[in-house]
Image (cartoon, rainbow, N blue to C red):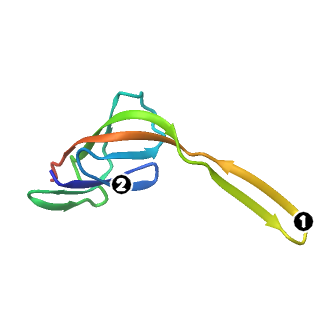
């Protein structure tokens, strides 16, 4: 199997079987499985199938490995004329998944 492009959390990911990626936090148990149905493109032996907007019948199967937090991002705002300073931080909640298989049955 080639590769697929799917969408989750407002972002798009290009994956192949065996890839480990981090996506925005999913509502799934760790060491469970997940199916992504918003597949935008599938490339296999038969060629490339582009959805309008999604490929009918295509899905991406993944195993949920763990829930993690991303690296810390520091935000600093400053207004010179007001002498105002503000420092904030943010850590994104992520889910690490391993892509098990890509099934493509386009119409």
Q: Which tag, 1 or 2, sits closer to the chain's start?
A: 2
Tell me where residue 101 sits by quadrant: top left
Q: Position of residue 70 (x, y in %)?
A: 53, 45
Cα separation, mark 1 vs mark 2, equals: 42 Å
Residue that appears at 61% across and 48% down: 72
Q: Position of residue 106 (x, y in %)?
A: 16, 52
Q: Position of residue 65 (x, y in %)?
A: 37, 33
Question: Label for residue 48?
Answer: none
Quick one: 52 or 23, which is closer to the camera? 23
Quick one: 4 or 37, which is closer to the camera? 4
**How packed is label 2: few (under 14 Cα within 10 Å), some, or many (20 or more)?**
some
| Residue 66 as seen in the image, left or right of residue 60 | right
Q: How many marks?
A: 2
Residue lying farthest right?
82
Contact check, label 1 and label 2, Cβ < 8 Å: no
Location of mark 1 (residue): 83
Q: Nearer the viewer, mark 1 or mark 2?
A: 1
Q: Does residue 25 lie above or below 90 as drawn?
A: above
Tell me where residue 54 sits by quadrant: bottom left
Q: Position of residue 61 (x, y in %)?
A: 27, 39
Residue that appears at 44% across and 39% down: 95
Q: Secondary structure at mark 1?
A: loop
**How packed is label 1: few (under 14 Cα within 10 Å), some, or many (20 or more)?**
few
Location of mark 2 (residue): 13
Residue that appears at 31% across and 59% down: 53
Residue that appears at 90% across and 65% down: 83
């Amino acid at each position: 199997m080639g590769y697929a492009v799917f969408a989750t959390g407002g972002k798009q990911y290009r994956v192949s079987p065996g890839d480990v990626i981090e996506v925005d936090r999913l509502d799934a148990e760790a060491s469970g499985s997940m199916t992504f149905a918003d597949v935008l493109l599938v490339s296999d032996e038969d060629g490339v199938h582009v959805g309008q907007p999604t490929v009918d019948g295509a899905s991406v199967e993944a195993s949920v490995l763990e829930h993690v937090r991303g690296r810390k991002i520091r935000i600093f705002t400053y207004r010179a004329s007001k002498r105002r300073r503000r420092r904030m931080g943010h850590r994104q909640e992520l889910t690490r998944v391993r892509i098990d298989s890509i099934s493509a049955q386009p119409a």
